[in-house]
Amino acid sequence: MLPDQFATRKKPMYPVGDALRAYLARYNRMFKLPVSYSRLTEWEEAMPLYDEKGEDSLWRSLIYRPELMKRLNKHLTGIYAMLKTEGDYSFVDHLYVDRIDYCTFGNSNPFRIRIVNAYNENQDYYYIKKADASRIYGLELEHLLSPNRMHYMVADDILVEEHIVGIPGDVFVERWMHDRHIKKVRLAKELVKFNERCFLRLLGDMRSYNFVVDVTPDFEETQVRIRAMDFDQQCYSGHKNFYLPQFFRENRPLAEFCMRQLNIPTASQYQKEEQSVVYRRINMASERVERIIQCMCGDRISTEAKVRQLRGSLAEHHKNKAFLACTRMGEVLRTSLEHLSENMKRQRSPLPALFDE
């Protein structure tokens, strides 16, 4: 288990450099937005939001001056249209901003915008955060190397993210993990694959409240997918186990659940399956993956001490001295993905004799 001190340490925000901005512009992630982060901070009052148990959610519901709220309603529904429909504004007249919340917890201090359809009262959310290079790298790598497509936009000082639908991991552990509709082996398999995916692309801090569980009923068995929803710990920590969700104290019930459901050969099989899938994704988007890693290699998104610590532990873990030459976190990630690719190529072999005619 990781020590409790990790629960309180905050990562600094890293600026979005010119190379990353050029990458984002090339792949249509850069936009001019009508609202700045500072404009959203001009609220008059903030009231605490409580969850269904009456406990403080750490979100504050904001009240703005009427004239400012009128402008924000127009601009924020417009941003929603940019995020969801590539800027088709033909439907925004029947949308309105029902609530703006502000979170006092975490690194990015996000605003959560609740959009409501006036015709049917259906609601949706998106987030406006301070632009942070680490988080952007995390979002882009999630888009490229995971089964999930990520919709987000970047402006001068703003990062706009769509809401990721699912049951928060800590809530899932408390209320859903032993639900009779969820096949235990299927859940354990997804946990192993999620753990491996985070480690391969060095996404850290995936304790239970930083991911969601997407539960989808199917015609025979309920499908389960685990999705990261917090990306600001991409390639930051120097601790190898920080990139393995199984080692967090908050995830201990899930780790023990997997140990009860899977033996070592089966767990190893699921790890190999995920490695193969990530390898295929790298090959399918090789140019784009290389471009984003080039940006990371030119950016400082962690400290030199953390880079040295991580490269040493990964060199030992993978038995690969190539990690020891890394001087930036981008280089560590590149070496990790190259190590994966080399292993995949080396393990390829002809079909065994039992498949011969």
Image (cartoon, helix red, strand yellow):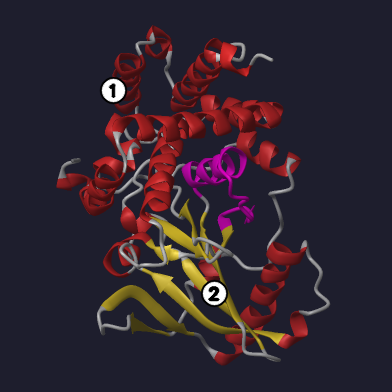
Camera-side residue: 357 or 326? 357
Residue at image mark 2: 113
Residue type at mark 2 is: Ile
Quadrant where the N terminus sits is: top left
Residue 110, given in percent of the width and then of the height, sits at 45, 64
Residue at image mark 1: 309
Q: Report which quarter residue 52 is drawn in.
A: bottom left
Q: Report which quarter residue 291 is drawn in.
A: top right
Camera-side residue: 47 or 151? 151
Quadrant where the C terminus sits is: top right
Residue at image location 50% in from the left, 15% down from the top: 343
Residue 183, given in percent of the width and then of the height, sits at 40, 57
Membership of 287 in magenta stretch: no
> Can residue 301 be spotted in the picture?
no
- Asked if residue 154 is positioned above or below residue 71 in the image, the reply reads above
Residue type at mark 1 is: Gln
